[in-house]
Amino acid sequence: MRLFIAINLNDDTQNRLLTLQNELHTYSKSGNFTLPDNLHLTLVFLGECNAKQADLIKSVMDTVAFKPIDLQMNQLGRFKRDEGDIWWAGVRENKELVDLQQRLVAGLRASGFQCDNRKYTPHITLGRKVISDLAPRTVEPFGEMAYKIDLMKSERIGGRLVYTSIYRR
């Protein structure tokens, strides 16, 4: 199973993200745009895991304390890539979110998982391999309170990438 821990978003936030994504699509020559049901905020990407490892991940999720987190998206940005950019909605700086992500990573590492060492940059991916005339910019803040985290499975079904929650805390 290809797994990651994420915060799934409510319908209002998804609709605001889709408005940004539609604007991006309108001003793009090409790109692979995230399906509406797949919009999420990744906390930790884990990659290929077996059932035993999934149980360990659930245990770590159960032990990490967190309070509701105020997620506010406030920018449209990109990671530059030669084959086309990764465009995203950026999350306003948020100590509680970063602390939660760091506690998850620490718990996973203590359980034997290899986790990315890069600085955590909270964002929701809107599209990959995008060639666009748009420029990154700030946007009117929008978002929600996050109360849950999900262990997500990523798989291809009928040629489409599908993300499914297999555990929620």
Image (tube, rainbow, N blue to C red):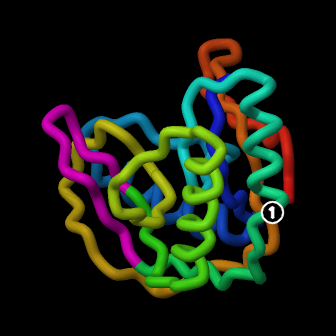
Which of 130 and 70 lies nearest the eye of the viewer? 70
37 on left or right of 120: right
Camera-side residue of 140 and 88: 88
Position of 164 with respect to 80 (left or right) is: right
Q: Position of residue 143 (x, y in %)?
A: 63, 79
Residue, x 77% and y 74% (percent of image)?
A: 65
Crowd tier of the residue under label 1, counting other residues whose Cα lies within 10 Å: few below 14, some 14–19, many 20 or above: few
Give x and y (percent) for residue 116: 41, 47
Q: Quadrant of residue 68?
A: bottom right
Is residue 12 shown in magenta?
no
Q: Quadrant of the N terminus?
A: top right
Disc 1 target residue:
63
Q: Is residue 140 above or below residue 31?
A: below
Picture residue at 82% right of the left edge, 49% below the top = 59
The quadrant of the rendering that contains the C terminus is bottom right
In this rendering, the answer to whether 118 lies above or below 69 is above
**Closer to the camera, 122 or 44?**
44
Task: Looking at the picture, tell me which residue is in the foreground, 17 or 150.
Answer: 150
x then y, percent, for residue 101: 57, 65
Total labels: the figure holds 1
Task: Check if residue 80 falls in the magenta segment.
Answer: yes
Snapshot quadrant of residue 31 = top left
Q: Is residue 102 left or right of residue 26?
A: right
Dominant secondary structure, magenta: strand
Mark 1: amino acid: Thr
Span of residues in magenta: 75-87
